Image: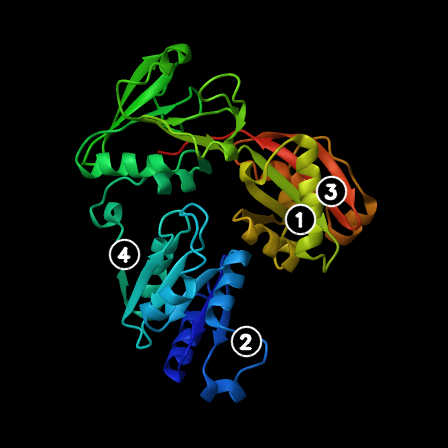
Amino acid sequence: MTLSVISFTRAGYELSKKINIGLSFDESYRIRLYVKCEALRQEISERDYVDEGLSDWAKARFEEGNVLIFIGSTGIAVRAIANIVDNKLTDSPVIVIDEKGQYVISLLSGHMGGANSLCKKLAEAINAVPVITTATDIRDVWAVDVFAKKNKLNIINKNGIKRVTSKLLEGYKIKLLIPDGVCDKKGIDNGLIELDYYDDNYFEVNFLGKKSQAHNLSDYDVVIINDYVKLNLITDSLNKKAADTDDLLFEKPLLLVPKEYVIGIGCKKGKTKEEISRAVKDTLDNLDIGLDQIAYIASIDLKKDEQGIIDFAEGQKIDYLTFTADELLRVEGDFTESKFVKDKTGVGNVCERAAILACEYGGELIRKKSKYDGITVSVAKRKWRIIL
């Protein structure tokens, strides 16, 4: 995850350097410091000085999938992002910090983008007070969008988030329906389960019987976790993909669909975001899979700083995982081996092994290595689980 930190005064710039040091221990963050202050122009590299308009700078960072951290007033941040905020499920996280480093404010995309959790980490790193205003957080109520993010679930009808959250905040309970066999909780047996949520965070488990009986859901408020990649949500004639159903209205349920696939990538050094994108999209198009169905992108740790893969993954808001050669070698299976790749990396196949290893609970290759001018791509279908 790339954090783009922008400051506007000398004090703000000094604070940004403190943030850089404070988070340097966490390899999941790549921190880029920017400055827009004429008094500091001669002290800042041309690459890091922002000459363009602030809104243009923010828009470019949004498109790259970066976290935006403004060291200054909330007004500056609001004006910078006013014309680019689009969708609560895909907007980049935005955080504001005053230049004295007293308060860290989660401004946008607190749940799905992770701004709330990052806000707390930043506050701890600079000894500041985290400011989080989302109702579910300040009242310690279960948040369905956080649950979806943690479990790699697409939220199909985003308007349902508000309905579910409102019910919980009013003290009602929500029934969470999970297909049999995917709930990572001891004691779950046959059939769909019903989890009643109470204000004290206790989930009472009840069985609803066979799956075929669980479609009569019109008489109570529910969250459904659906295991279909292509959904026939209203009638068979709709045959909508998950990404196409956001405009459909549902009386009660909030529908969640697992991201079932993992992409494995190997590449020569210096491949661009655009080259990676073309290779991945061509592979997925041939399988009729959308990027919104991808849980992870995976490769070998030699590629952990490969900018083209990083930029592509962040732009699509897909987690990028890397593994050591030893970890990849321990993966069992029939892989397309290459002596050249083994001599370079220590393992005869990167993309296929990485895709399988990233499946967590196991999976199977549905597309072996495809070659694209110095890039290899494979796809695995993972066995998904729900963590309560």
Residues marked 2 and 4 touching at CB (< 8 Å): no
Mark closest to the chain's N terminus, 1 or 3: 1
Tell me the kind of residue under disc 2.
Answer: Asp
Q: Is residue 324 left or right of residue 199?
A: right
Mark closest to the chain's N terminus, 2 or 4: 2
Mark closer to the observer (2, 3): 2
Tell me the kind of residue under disc 1.
Answer: Ser
Marks 2 and 3 sit apart, C-alpha to C-alpha, by: 38 Å
Tell me the kind of residue under disc 3.
Answer: Asn
Q: Which residue is mark 4?
A: 132
Q: Quadrant of residue 179?
A: top left
Mark closest to the chain's N terminus, 1 or 4: 4
Mark closest to the chain's N terminus, 3 or 4: 4
Tell me the kind of residue under disc 4.
Answer: Ile
Q: Describe the element under mark 1 as helix, strand or loop.
A: helix
How many numbered marks are there?
4
Q: Quadrant of residue 76?
A: bottom left
Nearest the eye: 66 or 206? 66
Name the residue at 73% across, 30% down: 334
Q: Describe the element under mark 4 as helix, strand or loop.
A: loop
Marks 1 and 2 sit apart, C-alpha to C-alpha, by: 26 Å
Q: Which residue is mark 1?
A: 277
Q: Position of residue 302 (x, y in %)?
A: 66, 55
Few, some or many residues within 10 Å of mark 1 (<14, 14–19, 20+): some
Q: Which residue is mark 3?
A: 349
Q: Which residue is mark 2?
A: 48
Decide if residue 11 is in sight here.
Answer: yes
